[in-house]
Amino acid sequence: MYTLGNWPAGSHGALVGLGILREIEPSSLVWMWECVEPDWVEPIWLTDALHDGRVMGFYSCGSEWCGVHVVENDRRRQWGLSIGSIVDAIGRALGGMVTEVVTQRIWLVGTMNRDGNYRELILLRGGGWPDAATVINSATRLLRSPAPAIVALDALPRENVWIGRQVPTLSLAESVSVVDGSLQVDLAPLVAQLNASTSNGSANWLTVTEAAELLMRDLPALNLEAARARVSVGGNRGAFRTNNLKRDQRRIEATSFSAWRLAQRDRDLDAEDED
C-alpha cells in the first residue's frame, strides 16, 4: 500500500489512469513529516459539524515546539497496486498478447527481434523471493522456450535459479517510463546485453542435427530426416544465421534459429486450425 507522498510530477495521475494504482480504504495512520521527530502516528479523527461534516485529525506529539497538529483527512488516502493492470500495461507496451504461465508470477508478454537477436519476453514477479528457483524451474512454458529473456517486475532473479542455461534479464525499474498516459519499455539494455554476449564469443552454434532435434520438439510429426531437410532448406534461404558452410560443416546460430523455429511452429499450428 502506498500513501500519496513525494511522487514525481504527474506520475500518480498517470498510474491511476492506467489502473496500476487504485485507491483503497483510508489509513488510520499518517506520516507526520512536519513534527520535530517525524513518524507514523494515529491522530484522533473528528467530524467538524460546523464545516459540512468535514473530518479532521488532531495529534499532540508532546513537544513544546510543535503543540497540537491539525491533519487534513486527505492525508489518510492510500493506494494499492493492481498486478493484473501492471501486466496488461506491460503487454501493451511490448506489443504482445499476455499469457499467464504461473499464476500471479510468470507471464509471456511478447517477443523481441532487434539487431538479429530474437527473444521471447517473459515477465517475472518475485525473482528475489525465496521460492523463485522452484517457481521458475516448474514453469514448463518458460523451460521450453528456445530463446527466453526475463523482464523482471521487481527484483532480478539470482543467477543460481536457472537450471543449465544462461537467461538475459531486464529490470523494469530501470527501463520503464510513462509517456502520454501509457507505459513504454526500453529494450535497448537487453539488446546491448545480448550483443555483448555475442561479441565475447559466447554465441551458441548448433549442428544441423541438433537444430533438427530442437525443431522436432515443436513439430512432433516430423522425423529426424524430415526435420533435417526443413532446417537445411531454411539455411539455404537465409532464414536464420549460419556459418555459410555446407553439409557436415554447417553451423547454425541458436538465437536466430529460435526465431525461425517458433515461426515454423506457429505456421504449422495455423494450418492445423484451418483443417
Image (cartoon, grey):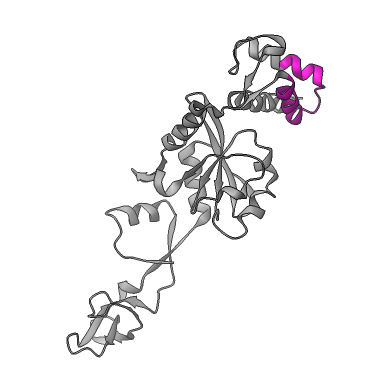
Q: Which residues are the magenta region?
A: 209-230
Left or right position of 265 against 157: right
How many numbered discs sit on the rendered protein? 0
Left or right position of 49 against 142: left
- Residue 175 position within the rendered picture, expressed as x and y whole percent measured from the top left: 41, 43
Q: Quadrant of the C terminus?
A: top right
Q: Nearer the viewer, residue 271 or 204?
A: 204
Query: Residue at the location (60% across, 14% down)?
Result: 243
- Judged from this view, the residue extending furthest toward the front is 200
Left or right position of 54 against 109: left
Query: Residue at the location (28% across, 86% down)?
Result: 59
Q: Quadrant of the N terminus?
A: bottom left
Residue 114 drawn in magenta: no
Q: Is residue 44 above or below residue 156?
A: below
Image quarter of residue 122: top right
Q: Is residue 89 above or below residue 44?
A: above
- Residue 261 position within the rendered picture, expressed as x and y whole percent measured from the top left: 66, 25
What secondary structure is the stretch in magenta mostly built from?
helix
Q: Is residue 151 above or below residue 243?
A: below
Query: Residue at the location (57% across, 40% down)?
Result: 167
